Amino acid sequence: MRVLVQEAPFDLAEETARFAKGEGGSGAIVTFTGVVRDNDAGTLSAMEIEHYPGMTEKALREIAQQAVARFDLQDALVIHRHGRLVPGEQIMMVATAARHRRSAFEAAEFLMDYLKSRAPFWKREITAEGEAWVAAKDDDEAALERW
Amino acid sequence: MMDVLYFAWVRERIGLPRERVESQATTVAELIEELRGREERYEVAFSDLSALRVAVDQELTDFDAPLNGAREVAFFPPMTGG
């Protein structure tokens, strides 16, 4: 299991290849990549991501450990960036390795649902109109109820 | 003495990222009451607790959580990772 919190970009192909080489017992590897999306008006100049150094790593590790235990994963990877990102940049990725695809898919969704509202990150949008903190969505909190 | 940390708009409203606080509070709620009594910017930041989350020693918890010996208490809005 690997958890990385970093400002620098990550190489998706390299991380995926390294993860996929890991375990012989896995029949399924799922990866998800989060990308900075422009707003509907096309005016997003940057996304700033603040986090809580120390707690972030701890929270992500706990979430990943839960996923490994619950879905009987062979391995899990979480990379999440912070700092200033522009539209099109990769913010984060998760990867899961399981014996069968259902567990790998479900574990990736579980990881995403939990890290959206249980890992201490806060997004701020910088647009032509000004700057604003992104509000948490009720949907994100509700998404945890299915687990 | 404990470190009190603020993130995102809570940090902006209070005007600092962290401070050392001498407190007699035994719960998070009592600490919030002490802070609210300090200055208006704290009163404003803590005016709607439903918009806030708290972590004690880097674990998410509730406002009625005990503080016994806590070294670090952090206040922030609901998280928006992913």
Image: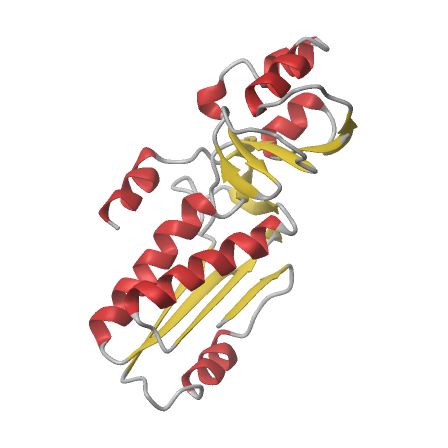
Which residue is the extreme one toward the front?
A: B68
Q: Which residue is painted at 66% across and 36% down in the image?
A: B70
Task: From this view, report whether residue A115 is shown above or below residue A142.
Answer: below
Q: Residue A30, how many percent across, how many down?
A: 33, 73
**Count of numbered tags:** 0
Q: Which residue is painted at 42% across and 66% down in the image?
A: A94
Which residue is the extreme one toward the bottom?
A: A24
Task: From this view, report whether residue B3 is shown above or below residue A77.
Answer: above
Q: Residue B19, how many percent across, how many down?
A: 77, 30
Q: Which residue is painted at 51% across and 43% down in the image?
A: A44
Q: Which residue is painted at 42% across and 48% down in the image?
A: A116
Q: Residue A69, how many percent across, how many down?
A: 35, 66
Relative to the observer, which residue lies in front, A146 or B1?
A: B1
Relative to the observer, which residue lies in front, B49 or A30?
A: B49
**Residue A64: quadrant of the picture:** bottom left
Relative to the observer, which residue lies in front, B10 or A49?
A: B10
Q: Is A3 on the left-hand or right-hand side of A71?
A: right
Task: From this view, report whether residue A31 is shown above or below residue B11.
Answer: below
Residue A41: in sight, yes or no?
yes
Q: Residue A129, how many percent across, how many down?
A: 54, 31
Task: From this view, report whether residue A124 is shown above or below residue A66.
Answer: above
Residue A86: in sight, yes or no?
no
Q: Which color scheme is applied?
A: secondary structure
Q: Is A2 on the left-hand or right-hand side of A116?
A: right
